Image: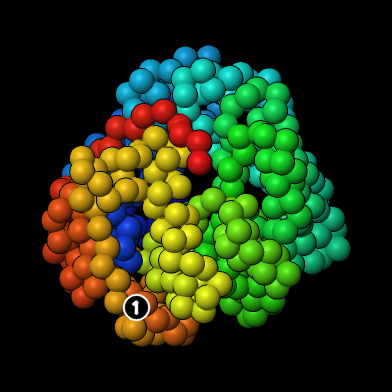
C-alpha cells in the first residue's frame, strides 16, 4: 500500500521480498489515490512502481476515497483493464454523506463483474467514542479498543451485508475481527447473499490485552484486537468455511512511528507488517495443531482469493495452463520471529519472540525458483501485473 502521503517502511521491492520468503507468489496492493489523483491515476502510478521493483506477480485493488463523477466513470474502464475490484471505507467521516454515490459505485462494479471490498467500522460511532474518551481524559493507547468498539464493527458489517442485498454486488468484508461481525455475515450468507469474509493474522494470534502493555500502541490495527472468544470464533470460521480468506493487510510502520507519543487512543497509527509471517504462522498454529486441514490452508491462502479476485485458474491452481506458482514447505523447520532480521524493512514484528514451526523451503513463481531456504533469488522487476477477469463465486 504505497503512498507519497504515508511513510510506510516498505516499497514494492522489500514488500515483495517478504512476501516471497513466506510463500506468497502474488500480492494484491491496495492502491490509494493521492489527494490530487483519480483512482485511475493512482492505479497507473502504483503499477509503474511495482513493475520496476516487485519480485513476485501483483495486482491492484482500486481504492475509492472520493466518489466523484470522474472516479465513478473510471470504474468500468479499470475493470476492462483487469482491475476487477473496488475498495472503500465505512470508517471515513465522509462515507454516510456520500452513501448514495458509494451504492452507485457498487452497482457499477456489479455490472462490470467485480467485487466490492468494504472496511466495516462505523465512523459516527467511533467519533462519539473518541469524543467521550477525550472528555474523560482516557487517551492513553491502552484505551484504543474503546475508541473503536466491537459494536462499531458489528453495525457496519450488518450494513455491508445489506448493501450486497440492495445492490446485488458481491461484498468482501476485509479483516473481520469479531465473532458478532462474523454472525452478521453468516446471516447474509444463509439467505444466499454474495458475502465473503477475510480475516488477518493479528486476530488469530493476539488479543486485546496486548493494548494494555507499555508498548501496546505497536499492536494497533483497525479494527483493534478483540477477545479470546473472538479469536476462537475466527479459527472455527476458517476451519468450517464461514471465513473464506486470510490476508495480510500489510501496513509496515517503524516501531518509532507506531509508538510516537504525539498519537493517542483516538488516532493511533494503524497496521503492522504481516507479509513475512502470515502463512508460516497459520501453518504452525493451524495445520500442525489440527485446527486447520491442509486443504483448508490452501483454500484460504490461495484458491479462494484467486477465485474471488478473478485470478483463477491462472493462479490458485496446479494445472496445465496455470502459472507454475508453487511453494514447497518444510513442515519441521522452527524459527523464532525477529522482525528486525526479516526481509521487510519494518524493524519489528508484533509476533517477536513467537516460535513458529513450518516455513517455505522453495518458492517458485511462474516456474522460477525465487526463494531457497530464506534466500531471495528473484530479481526486482521480475514480477508481472496480472490482469484479472470477472469475480468468481466460491
The answer to which of 299 and 168 lies nearer the viewer is 299
The answer to which of 110 and 223 lies nearer the viewer is 110
* Side of 127 where 367 appears, left or right: left
Display colour scheme: rainbow
Q: Secondary structure at mark 1?
A: strand
Is residue 176 at least partly visible in the picture? Answer: yes
Query: Which residue is pictured at 50% across the width and 36% down the height?
Result: 393
| x and y percentages locating residue 126 in the rendered image | 75, 49
Query: Which residue is pictured at 46% across the width and 39% down the height?
Result: 308
| x and y percentages locating residue 343 in the rendered image | 29, 68
Query: Which residue is pictured at 43% across the width and 18% down the height?
Result: 76
Query: Which residue is pictured at 29% across the width and 54% down the height?
Result: 25
The residue that disc 1 covers is 331
Query: Image quadrant of residue 378?
Result: bottom left
* Side of 333 where 96 appears, left or right: right
Q: Mark 1: few, some, or many residues within 10 Å (few <14, many ≥20)?
A: some
In the displayed structure, 128 sits above or below 82; it is below
In the displayed structure, 212 sits above or below 37; it is below
Total count of labels: 1
Is residue 211 at least partly visible in the picture? Answer: no
Query: Image quadrant of residue 158?
Result: top right
* Side of 47 where 127 appears, left or right: right
| x and y percentages locating residue 119 in the rendered image | 61, 43
| x and y percentages locating residue 168 in the rendered image | 63, 24
The answer to which of 118 and 161 lies nearer the viewer is 161
In the displayed structure, 33 sits above or below 295; it is above
* Side of 119 where 24 appears, left or right: left
Amino acid at each position: 500500500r504505497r503512498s507519497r502521503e504515508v511513510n510506510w517502511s516498505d516499497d514494492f521491492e522489500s514488500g515483495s521480498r517478504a512476501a516471497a520468503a513466506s510463500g506468497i507468489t502474488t500480492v494484491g496492493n491496495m492502491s490509494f489515490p493521492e489527494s490530487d489523483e483519480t483512482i485511475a491515476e493512482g492505479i497507473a502510478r502504483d503499477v509503474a512502481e511495482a513493475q520496476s521493483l516487485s519480485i513476485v506477480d501483483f495486482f491492484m485493488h482500486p481504492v475509492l476515497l472520493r466518489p466523484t463523477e470522474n472516479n465513478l466513470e473510471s470504474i468500468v474502464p479499470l475493470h476492462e483493464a483487469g482491475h476487477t475490484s473496488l475498495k472503500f471505507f465505512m470508517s471515513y467521516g465522509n462515507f454516510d454523506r456520500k452513501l448514495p454515490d458509494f451504492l452507485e459505485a457498487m452497482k457499477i462494479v456489479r455490472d462490470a463483474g467485480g467485487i466490492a471490498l468494504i472496511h466495516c467500522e462505523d465512523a459516527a460511532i467511533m467519533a462519539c467514542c473518541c469524543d467521550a474518551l477525550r472528555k474523560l481524559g482516557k487517551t492513553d493507547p491502552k484505551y484504543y479498543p474503546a475508541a473503536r468498539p466491537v459494536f462499531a464493527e458489528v453495525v457496519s458489517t450488518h450494513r455491508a451485508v445489506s448493501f450486497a442485498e440492495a445492490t446485488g454486488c458481491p461484498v468482501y468484508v476485509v479483516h473481520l475481527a469479531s465473532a458478532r461481525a462474523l454472525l452478521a455475515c453468516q446471516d447474509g450468507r444463509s439467505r444466499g447473499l454474495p458475502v465473503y469474509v477475510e480475516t488477518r493474522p493479528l486476530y488469530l494470534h493476539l488479543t486485546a490485552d496486548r493494548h494494555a502493555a507499555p508498548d501496546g500502541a505497536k499492536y494497533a490495527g483497525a479494527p483493534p484486537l478483540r477477545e479470546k472468544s473472538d479469536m476462537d470464533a475466527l479459527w472455527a470460521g476458517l476451519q468450517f468455511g464461514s471465513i473464506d480468506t486470510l490476508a495480510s493487510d500489510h501496513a509496515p510502520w517503524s516501531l518509532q512511528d507506531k509508538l510516537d507519543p504525539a498519537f493517542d487512543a483516538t488516532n493511533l497509527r494503524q497496521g503492522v507488517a504481516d507479509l513475512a509471517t502470515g502463512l508460516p504462522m497459520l501453518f504452525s498454529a493451524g495445520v500442525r495443531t489440527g485446527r486447520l486441514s491442509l486443504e483448508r490452508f490452501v483454500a484460504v491462502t490461495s484458491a479462494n482469493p484467486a477465485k474471488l479476485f478473478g485470478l483463477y485458474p491462472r493462479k490458485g491452481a496446479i494445472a496445465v495452463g496455470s502459472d507454475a506458482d508453487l511453494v514447497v514447505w518444510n513442515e519441521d523447520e522452527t524459527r523464532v520471529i525477529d522482525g528486525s532480521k526479516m526481509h521487510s524493512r519494518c524493524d519489528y514484528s508484533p509476533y517477536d519472540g513467537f516460535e513458529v514451526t513450518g516455513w517455505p523451503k522453495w518458492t517458485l513463481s511462474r516456474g522460477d525458483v525465487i526463494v531457497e531456504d530464506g534466500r531471495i533469488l528473484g530479481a526486482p522487476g521480475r514480477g508481472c501485473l496480472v490482469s484479472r477477469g470477472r469475480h468468481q463465486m466460491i
